[in-house]
Amino acid sequence: MKRLKLLAVVGLSLLALSACKMNKNEAAKDPVTAATDLAASVRANDFDRLSHIMVPPDLYAKLEARYKDEAAKKPAPTAEDEAQFKANFIDKYTAPGAEDKLFAQLQPQLAQMGPQIPMGVAMMSGMAGQSIDQNAKMSPAEKTQAKAVLTAITKWASTAPLADPEKAKQAIKVVCDAARDLKLTTLAAAQKLSFSEMAQKAGVAVGGLRKALAVYGFDTDKMLDSVKAVKKSGDDNNAVVTLSYTLLDTPVSVDVNMVQRDGRWYSADLIKSVEDSLANKPAEVAPPMSAPPAMQPGSDAQPAEGETPASSDQPSDAQSAPADGASSPASDASNGGG
């Protein structure tokens, strides 16, 4: 009996040791797991892992090298740059009492925004629908799924309490908490972040955005938890995986083309996107922490609703003014607060 217990302890220890040696930044060896791992990384706000498993190691190395090269070319921030960064990011989002100041700026707009929301949602939904219809690159099946997503987001945006002051306060607090969690104190420090560190900051920023959306009933956690994958077809080198998930109570499915590289599986579309990006020399540094344009307090812009999200990522449009603000820390940090 004692011998059996000893063997069990040894076996468990070996399993634990094996788990410790596993590299979470390696893509899976089967297409189904590889596809669901992408969604799982977004669900965990682990964009460092996501940046590794979305492309093969050689492409990741090229992305990292491009980032380092562009960062090295950027001049050191001037005193004026640092002052703008402090005013537009540090003071606005992380200073004590930032939440109250932001709400005071936003509050007058909420009453004006309320009556305009239905018309704005209808207009943006119509434009997005036309864009889907006119997209020559989408198959009929893809257009059907895109319209299902658009319908779900339109319904949510039409009924969500986007102009509710209490919801705005909650969302603003989420924004400020995320900004503080970024732990950026100077523009110079932000520019010295490594590629991996920048990806980690992106995870913090996107996590804040997802929490802000949840305030208004857009639960991306629930959506990402519902992701399931099934292999539809394929061979040893290529496969089609059907991803299905539930978006705002609407079932959605999409076929993802997967490709095998050196025994591991990746999204063929993501590989092509990265390869195309690397083939084109950017005019300016394109930080991985890019985010949708923020609707700053005091802006006359209206929320943009109804655009179609990617299959396994959380929706990036259809955001209210406060929810859009969740992306502001990332945008300000990346652009020097300008």
Image (cartoon, rainbow, N blue to C red):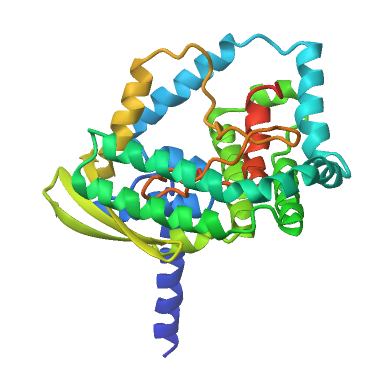
- Give whichever of 77, 121 is nearer the camera: 121
Q: Going by the image, does 163 lie left or right of 249?
A: right
Q: Going by the image, does 55 lie left or right of 161?
A: left
Q: On screen, 113 above or below 335?
A: below
- Residue 127 percent coordinates (x, y): 41, 38
Q: Measuring 47% from the left and 53% from the top, which residue is drawn there?
A: 154
Q: On screen, 2 above or below 130?
A: below
Q: Quadrant of the N terminus?
A: bottom left
Q: Going by the image, does 286 lie left or right of 178?
A: left
> Which residue is the extreme one toward the right?
96
- Residue 20 percent coordinates (x, y): 47, 55
Q: Going by the image, does 231 lie left or right of 317?
A: left
- Residue 244 percent coordinates (x, y): 31, 60
Q: Measuring 72% from the left and 20% from the top, which residue is drawn there?
A: 188
- Give whichever of 220, 61 is nearer the camera: 220
Q: Measuring 81% from the left and 26% from the top, which residue is drawn there?
A: 87
- Residue 125 percent coordinates (x, y): 44, 45
Tally of numbered tags:
0
- Give whichever of 323, 311 is nearer the camera: 323
Q: Quadrant of the C terminus?
A: top right
Question: Is residue 49 in sight in this rendering?
Answer: no
Question: Is residue 254 in sight in this rendering?
Answer: yes
> Which residue is the extreme one toward the left?
235
